[in-house]
Amino acid sequence: MTDKTTENATVEVDGAQFTTVTEGLATILVPQGAKVGEDRSEVQQVFYNPIQQYNRDLSVLAIKAYGEEALEKRKNRKQTKDAKHGKKRKRGDENGVAAEATDKTEQPEQAGQPAPQPESQLAQEDQSSANISANTTKPSFKMLDALSASGLRALRYARELPFVTSITANDLSASAAKSIKQNVKHNNVEDIVSVTNGDALAVMYRTIADSLANGEGSKPWKKSSKYDVIDLDPYGTAAPFFDAAVQAVRDDGGLLCITCTDSAVWAGHAYCEKAFSLYGGTPIHGMHSHEAGLRLIINAVATSAARYGLTIEPQLSLSIDFYTKVFIRITKSPQAVKFLGSKTMVVHSCDSGCGAWETQYLMRAKAVPNKKGNGAYYKYGMALGAADQLCKHCGTKMHVNGPMYGGQIHSREFIERLLKQIPEADKSVYGTLPRLEGMLQNALEELIPGPEETAPVERRDKEYAKIDHYPFFVIPGKLASTVSCATPGDDMFRGALKHLGYMAGRSHCRPGSIKTDAPWSTLWWIMSEWIRQKAPIKASKFKEHTAPWRLLKNIGILKDEAEAGAGAANGQDDVKMEGVEGEVKEAEKPSAEEPTAADKKTFTEEDLRKTLVFNDDLARLGREGKVQKLVRYQMNPRENWGPLTKAKSN
């Protein structure tokens, strides 16, 4: 599905001819003759990329979901605070009334002085004046589009977000700033959008300086000069802006929207030194490299924020086409920052062997009983080493990747609020809604719950300590290519996992991916059973002491040399388990029924393995709960799909 933009008739502004391009409710002016992201042979004066409409649609809807909730929470906090202060004032008034009554008994009423109004009438007047003020005063909601380019993003925010009161659209290019001013005037949003021409770092650090000068950190009742939302969408990496952004956004739950388009750095393995210098960790070489890239970026933001006692809450983290988009809430909480070490992990990857991995957290937060014995608290300590130098499945050398973020990269509540908006959204405004819905559903399936903390710790600390017990995903096709066998269908593989009592979802990062809580030993057992039942392999294809040979030998597919030689002498090159056909036929009889959910709770995995049969029933089990007719993964709408050349500025 291509992104939808509408080119209108030519217009004249200040004696120059422009072509208008409409996206959403905003319209930008493009110099006549300039190409709009189609012809790469001509250098663009101001960077505008129609491919990024999906990014902008997602940003608008995400900020709308965030803003509505944030303003509602802020309103509730203010009402609670006002009610509390009102009660205190009422007690003071009662004392004042009593004192006034005492004075009246001692002094006669002066002539011509109006009688005092009853307390109930004063309360009604105060309440009515408060209601009028609440109805007429729009709560402040400030945004910064730090690298605005054509200003289209800021214009869409101004036109499509009704609660926004102020947007700063900044760009380092003088020509871009001039173009933004023209577009702001053309869209009649001059009362909301202000344009600045300067370095984005300077804009954010000036905001930080103003906040410090006003003493907002020590005087929380003062009006915040920081931004509610900061959007960073540079050409390439956003890492140089992390330190300023985490300080310039509100620390009571402000939102950072970060785009990074340097996928060759955070998702490749050819620029490890560059990834470490930008994001403080090394990327992964493997099928799950894009999710690892997301975790590298989030960890870079988390470490930047932790220096100032700020904690992060990832709301939504997506790898889209050639870039990442993450939405992160920033909150002041020195207590939560203590858990960052226990939510930071390194990954030991068998990237040149079978593709397996192991995670190793840098610290651990362990719940221990308190001295009184009526509760528990978290004690922080160093983590124990877990991984070997060699892969336990195929014996290949492991490589260390990271450190990277080991917590959940999505918020279920945030995604559900986003999904509720989609049926109500105007399809003519948001042209990428089908793909948005499919990708959000995929992200929702990634949230596999882990074991719950049973110790009686505080609920807040329990939330701080949560980690993602099942990061990354597998692709059956990659597993099959490792052992050179036919690929099991996605539904068949999911059905096998569910049959054994595990969860099986998807990852938004790659088509054909499966997110599961099953260990690698179970995954390779499923592949071995697939080979035995449906996809026999040639033993002669595998050289001794290679990774596939060791893997197949460990899972019982390849026999010892003596047994293999005897089998070859008898002309038996295909590897099959003896009696498999009999087992399959026996399992397909009515007496060997598929265990119910209640039965699976009492069966062990070893018991369930004995009844696993790759047939149509297993595929149907894999399809259970599947939402149909969703655009889960986008196909490239045209050749050479990707980022455009960097815009030239003056």
Image (spheres, helix red, strand yellow):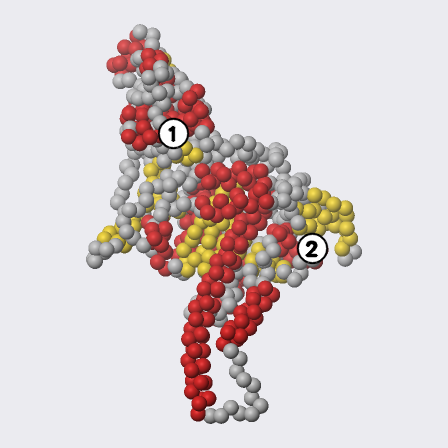
Residue for point 33% across, 17% down: 591
Residue nearer the viewer, 408 or 261: 408
Residue nearer the viewer, 172 or 90: 90
Residue nearer the viewer, 200 or 477: 477
Please say whether residue 182 is visible from this viewpoint. no
Q: Amino acid at mark 1?
A: Lys
Secondary structure at numbered mark 2: loop
- Of badges 1 and 2, nearer the viewer stands 1
**Comes first in the chain, label 1 or label 2:** 2
Q: Position of residue 423 (x, y in %)?
A: 58, 42
Dot 1 crowding, Cα within 10 Å, few <14, some 14–19, many 20+ = some
Residue for point 46% across, 71% down: 86
Secondary structure at numbered mark 1: helix
Dot 2 crowding, Cα within 10 Å, few <14, some 14–19, many 20+ = some
Q: Position of residue 459 (x, y in %)?
A: 34, 53
Q: Amino acid at mark 2?
A: Asn
Would residue 241 be found to the left or right of residue 46 on screen? left
Q: CA distance from mark 1 to mark 2?
A: 53 Å
Residue for point 70% across, 46% down: 21
Is 195 situated above or below 294? below
Mark 2 lies on residue:
187
**Image quadrant for the C terminus?**
bottom right
Would residue 353 be found to the left or right of residue 168 on screen? left
| Among the 4 quarters of the image, the one containing residue 567 | top left
- The reply to whether dot 1 and dot 2 touch (C-beta < 8 Å) is no
Is 54 situated above or below 492? below
Please say whether residue 595 is visible from this viewpoint. yes
Q: Position of residue 157 (x, y in %)?
A: 60, 53
Would residue 489 be found to the left or right of residue 379 on screen? right
Residue nearer the viewer, 266 or 338: 338
What label does residue 255 carry, if any? none
Mark 1 lies on residue:
498
